[in-house]
Amino acid sequence: MALLTGSQRSSEKSALHEAITSGTVRLVIGTHALIQKEVKFFNLGLVIIDEQHRFGVRQRLKLVSKGPPPDVLMMTATPIPRTLAMTLYGDMDLSIIDELPPGRKPVQTKCVPGKAREMLYRNLRKEVEAGHQIYIVYPLIEESEKTDLKDATSNAQWLQERIFPEYTVGLLHGRLSPDEKEDLMTRFKSGEIQVLVSTTVVEVGVDVPNASIMVIEHAERFGLSQLHQLRGRVGRGQALSSCYLIVHGNQSEDAQKRLAIMEETTDGFKIAEADLAIRGPGDLIGVRQSGSPLFMTRFLGWDSQLLKQARDDAFSLLQHTPETDLAGVMAYLEEKMKGWEELARI
């Protein structure tokens, strides 16, 4: 087996490409680097895409097109609307892990208006004094003249000076080098850093059991998948954990719905259902992963038995309908889907 990432040296990547093409390497684990055209597989049989919501439709298409159609397993804590719609209306089987991993505890979630921030900071200090650690996530790296959103850089400095002067506040964002990011996360995991101010780079792949609080500034600006993934960074240890969603100004109706479902449940599948209902399924054959579909079908909700019966009936109807009777339907579809034939594979 081998690991392939974009940060490897060119000579190392070239050697891996040859090994993958020849079949010497039978199992490849990697990042988006696996999508690049230089990567060719000897005999691709299975593709597993973890954190599926972080990939676009065309990116997944590039990966599964690297050989005869492989089996595909997509994994995510929060299926994006298009993927969930595919399990309802498309040819995709669904497996649900409906229990938390051993030792994982539910996370209490609460919306906090921006003007109540001082009271929240007092609670955060008590958590740090008790020996726990905190994430505080911002939507921007630096202050911008184009928006009044709070940013990670200036607020990390303010938090260090005004709220946590006797503790260590770290700053993590996407512009740091891989070595700098790794150093920060190592120091946070070891307890050297008590408060980690960050952008959404901590959304996935971060496991610090001693971190018990997640604070998300401008939570009304984040999508449900992001909010749920960020909340999943806490509740991994023995302490009861909380997620505070700091909201600003008047929220849109959709934002209010997102925040309400976050307070109501920690069930990723219920959150995904709400996301589908709020944003729409996008194009089942196409690249949009949310929004109104090409065919305005009525969203039936999550009645899985009814939808399974409807799908079975549809397949049965196709199997028993003479091809001549389907010609008109197929002609219409071919005209509508022109140029999208490849997308139908994913």
Image (spheres, helix red, strand yellow):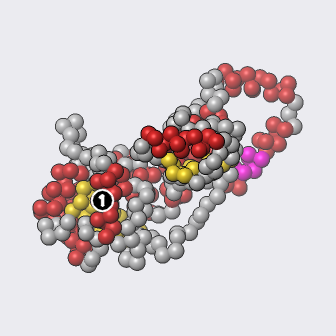
Q: Is residue 92 above or below residue 342?
A: below
**SS at mark 1?**
helix
Residue for point 37% across, 56% down: 202
Against 78, is 316 above or below?
above
Q: Which residues are magenta?
A: 306-312
Q: Is residue 233 left or right of residue 249?
A: right
Is residue 138 part of the magenta span, yes or no?
no
Q: Position of residue 59 (x, y in %)?
A: 53, 38
Q: In the displayed structure, would residue 119 be above or below residue 308?
A: below
Q: Residues within 10 Å of mark 1 (few under 14, many from 20)?
A: few
Main secondary-structure element of the magenta-colored stretch: helix
Q: Give the percent coordinates (x, y) of residue 304.
A: 67, 55
**Residue that numbered label 1 is attached to:** 183
Question: Residue sitting at 39 percent across and 58 percent down?
Answer: 230
At which x and y percent is residue 117? 21, 61
| Left or right of residue 24: residue 309 | right
Left or right of residue 251, residue 5 in this image: right
In percent of the image, x 48 and y 75: which residue is there?
Answer: 103
Q: Quadrant of the C terminus?
A: top right
Kindly indicate the quadrant of the structure image that contains residue 235: bottom left
How far across and down, in percent of the image, does residue 109 sit? 38, 65
Q: Residue at x 77, y 23 (%)?
A: 328
Amino acid on which disc 1 is placed? Asp
Comparing 44 with 79, the one in front is 44
Residue placed most toward the observer, 191 or 261: 191
Q: Quadrant of residue 262?
A: bottom left
